[in-house]
Image (cartoon, rainbow, N blue to C red):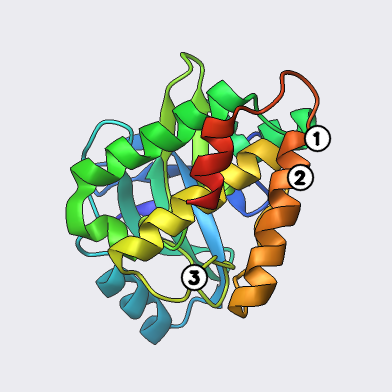
Amino acid sequence: MSRLTLLGPCAAWGTSVFRAYRTNDEGETEPVWVLVGAATASPDTLEASRTAAAQVLELSLPGLLRLVDVDTLEGRVGWVYEQVQGVGLGRVLEEEGSLSARAAAEVVARVADVFLEVGPLAASHPGPVVDELLLDVKGRLWIAGLAGPGEDEVPVPLPTHQEPDLVYRLGALLAHLLTGTRLPAPGEREAHVGLLRRVLLRALDRPGPVLTERYSDWLRG
C-alpha cells in the first residue's frame, strides 16, 4: 500500500494540485502530483473513485499524463499522477491572455491525436479544459483529467460523452485558447448562436494577426 507525503501546492499547474512523494511498501519513493477533489475521502467515496479510475490506472500513452494511484490527501480524494516538469496551460493563459492562432490549433490537434490513441475511454473525459493540459520544459503537451474529480466538481461544456460531444469540447477548447475565456455550457439553440457570434467577435478582435476564415470556420463547426 503506497503512502503520500505532502510537500506543498503546485503553483505552476493549478490551485487544486499538490506536490507530494509517493512511498511504496519497499520504501521506494517517487515525486508525484496530486489533483485533489472537493469530496471528503470517506471509504465509500474513495472506493468509488478507484473503481471509476480502474481502466485509466497505469495507462501509458505518449502525451497522456499517467495516473498511478487514487488515494487520500488532506482528508480529500486525490488522483495521483506522474510528475512532469512543466507549467499548466491555464497558468499560461493567465499570463498571456490567449494563445496565437497557430499555437491554439497545434494544442487542439495534439489533444485530438492523443484521444484517438486513447480510444473509447476518451469519450469519458469531461473536458478537455486548459487546467488539465501541461506544457513540459521541452514544449511537449501532456493531458490529465481522464480520471479525476467528478463532473459535479468540474464544470464541463456538455453533460454527455458521445463522439459529437467530444468534437464540440475540442471546439470549446479552441475557443478558450483563442479568446482567453472559457465557453459556458450551451443553452437553447438561439442563445447558443448568439454566444458563438460573441466568441467569434472576441477571436477576431484579439491582438496580433487577423484570424483567418479557416479558424472562424473551425469555431462555427
Q: Position of residue 96 (x, y in %)?
A: 76, 28
What amino acid type should be assigned to the residue bearing mark 3? Leu
Q: What mark, if any, has residue 205 been given in the picture?
A: 1
What amino acid type should be assigned to the residue bearing mark 1? Asp
Q: Residue furthest front?
A: 213
What amino acid type should be assigned to the residue bearing mark 2? Leu
Closer to the camera in the image, 8 or 182:
182
Q: Quadrant of the N terminus?
A: bottom left
Q: In the structure shown, which secondary structural element does the residue marked by tag 1 occupy?
A: loop
Q: In the structure shown, which secondary structural element does the residue marked by tag 3 occupy?
A: loop
Marks 2 and 1: in contact by CB < 8 Å?
yes
Q: Few, some or many C-alpha atoms within 10 Å of disc 2 (few <14, some 14-19, many ≥20)? A: few
Q: What mark, if any, has residue 158 been given in the picture?
A: 3
Q: Earlier in the sequence, mark 3 or mark 1?
A: 3
Q: Few, some or many C-alpha atoms within 10 Å of disc 1 (few <14, some 14-19, many ≥20)? A: few
Closer to the camera in the image, 89 or 47:
89
Can residue 13 be seen at all in this image of the molecule? Answer: no
Q: Is residue 7 left or right of residue 124?
A: right
Q: What mark, if any, has residue 201 been given in the picture?
A: 2
Q: Position of residue 19 (x, y in %)?
A: 55, 41
Closer to the camera in the image, 93 or 4:
93
Residue 111, above or below 46: above
In the image, what residue occupies the spot 32% across and 78% down? 47
Q: Position of residue 152 (x, y in %)?
A: 55, 78
Q: Closer to the observer: label 3 or label 2?
A: 2
Real-space Cα separation, disc 3 to disc 2, in angstroms: 23 Å
